[in-house]
Amino acid sequence: MIRTPLALALLTTFAATGMAHAAASSAAPDSHPDTAQAVDLATVHVQARAPQDQRGSGIDSYGNATLHDTPASVTVIARRQLDDRQIRTLSELAREDASLGDNYAPVGYYQDIAIRGYPLDPATGFRSNGLTIAGEQKVPLEDVQQVQILKGLAGLEAGVMEPGGVVNYVSKRPADVRSVTLGTDSHGSRHAAVDLGGWLTPAFGVRVNAAHEDIHSFVRHADGRRSMLALAADWKISERTTLALDGNYQTSGQRSVSGYQLLGGTTIPAHPDASRLLGYQPWQQPVGIQSSNSSVRIDHALSDDWRVRLAGGHSRSVIDDNVAFAYGCFYASECADGSVPGWFFAPNGDYDIYDFRSPDDTRVSDEARAVLEGHVATGAVSHALSLGASAFRRTIDRRAYVYDYVGTGNISQLDPPIFAPSPNQPGASVRRLTSWQHSLFALDRVHLGEHWQLIAGGRLARLHERSYDSSGAPERNTRLSKTLPQAAVLWQPNAPTTVYLSYSEGLSLGIEAPYWTSNGGSTLGPRLSRQLEAGVKLQTSDTLALSGAVYRIHQPWQFARPDGTPEGFTFVQQGDEVHTGLELGANGQLGNNLRVIASASVIRARAEHSGTPSYEGHQLINVPRFRSALFVDYRLPFAPSLSLLGGWRHASANIATPEGAVRVPAYDVFDAGLRYTSPWRGHALTWRLSVDNVFDHFYWRDTGSTGGDRYLFPGAPRLARLSVSYDFQ
């Protein structure tokens, strides 16, 4: 018997379906709201409420209040939007909000994004159901009900984190669901997914999601595959106690695509090819990533006014890194005399090819959290209190990697010459990092009558990190404690309107100096960030929400400063990186047939007091001054089963060098699609056609960096996707 992840997923799915069907048949029709038997109904048109639901947001920083009562800018990408846009990757997810952008997001590799111009730290920037997960993975989206983008500083929420924000994946919950989806695209990819669930008893429900994808990439030689399986379960233990369990597992393999670099450090490649795998070697293996995420959450009501929430999570990602990596020009003839920096491509387009192998690169994150929430009334003033503690542990185990030069190629070549791989082999696996974060936090939300709320709180964060070199010898031992305050005032003149002003502080880990600086390999100290934000949220109707926010974020700037050392640069912390921005958003129905999701972001990102005048007075690298995103869904009045879908993405010119002399052009990308829903044998059948980049426009989507090196990544060319979903419950 073949025991692949997909086969196991299908077996589990069919078992769950049978159990759910048996339970539903034996239970009384009104024993649970989700156990009623399905009946055939005439076609009806349903209008959904606006995305800001009235349940708790799950954001501990603000007492688990509703998103409407949360003094922060939060974007919710709902399941329907994920389906209509047929989103598969984090980079595709970043298109949905103008405050997000790619930051070193190669095809075939795990990806990172930036929020408000600040790249997320993979160690702390990603969450599943509110618990931190390893960011070095391709998070599957088939089992996700919605994605929450919490923008800006939230030191009370996460303690040690980058100031841009966090991404939280919220899992689907048990429900009577039996759905299968099949899809393909214009490159020949194949995608299959099943979503099955039910309430086995009135108090216990499960949901299983499974998917498999054969990826035919727009990049030559970069086809891949992935399989995932996810399980969610809810158990209502008593009237006061509920238990939620979640787990997912995914395995994937795909060649990683190297980014372009500036020619000679000053020139954008003139005729780049988005479909070209730079550095391709036939012996290059796919990058394999196996990831698993699991969590348990208990919610217990101590009384009508007090409740306790306990949560624990485990996340693990194992990366088998195999890359024929295109990087720099140290060995190219045009760079041999040292006149051209070796960490860029040569002026004539030559680049070095390295055999990079780092198997069993293992990242593990474990988190436990306890929160006590309650309400206290003192006369006309009421208090919503939150008290909590958390512990977070992250480890990295890695083998001594192979990173050897094997030959030189040129960007004009369809495929570079074939070179022999390095004969060297990776070393033994050793512990490279152990990081502990322990926190105590408290929050008081004071209600002053019907229109005013005051929020005050703080987190005491204790960080202890130990790092080791490739032999396992101790390298760095960091201990620090910091109190991170947070405060906000909310004015609600009427139920649909919230106006807020908030102040937050957060702590970010220091950055490791690039190898080409005089202090390469050393890690600078942590950075304290501060944010001031003002915003308004307006629920204009049951189906339309508007929002706006202005903010200013200060973070100490760590950068490679030019100097007189033999290397020419020293990595330092000096001055501040200051981002000042405006965000606007609209989400909901405009009339009976038109749904709109729109956002715009203006950011002024500057370095101040850095001691390096050429690095100041202009926009920072990979932070476009203006971005906008628009998605429309128009249901044809004369054919209500058919909807026209369309999208538009814009980004202004993007800086690519620290002195601001080189920038990639602005771009506009247009998307289109159709959705057709009709009954078939008494159940819903939905066809979706989406076409990304309709006019096949070439653009640079990313000028981000990793490890101190800067890259240029082309946007994807035109891609058509077709899927069909059948709900057979």
Image (cartoon, rainbow, N blue to C red):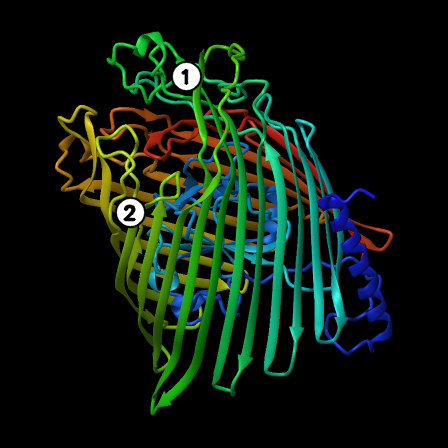
From the viewer's side, name the closer residue of 82 and 277: 277
Which residue position holds label 1? 352
Tell me, yes or no, if residue 430 can be seen here. yes
The amino acid marked with disc number 2 is Gly
Residue 26: image quadrant is bottom right
CB under 8 Å between discs 2 and 1: no
| Residue farthest bottom in this picture | 379
Q: State the CA–CA distance, disc 2 to disc 1.
A: 30 Å
**Residue 253 in the image, given as x and y percentages of width and height:** 61, 35
**Residue 281 in the image, given as x and y percentages of width and height:** 55, 18
User: Can you say whether 72 is above or below 287 in the image?
Assistant: below
**Residue 687 in the image, given as x and y percentages of width and height:** 73, 42
Which residue position holds label 2? 510
- Rendered-image quadrant of the C terminus: bottom right
User: Can you say whether 445 is above or below 46 in the image?
Assistant: below
- Rendered-image quadrant of the N terminus: top right
Q: Secondary structure at mark 1?
A: strand
Q: Secondary structure at mark 2?
A: loop
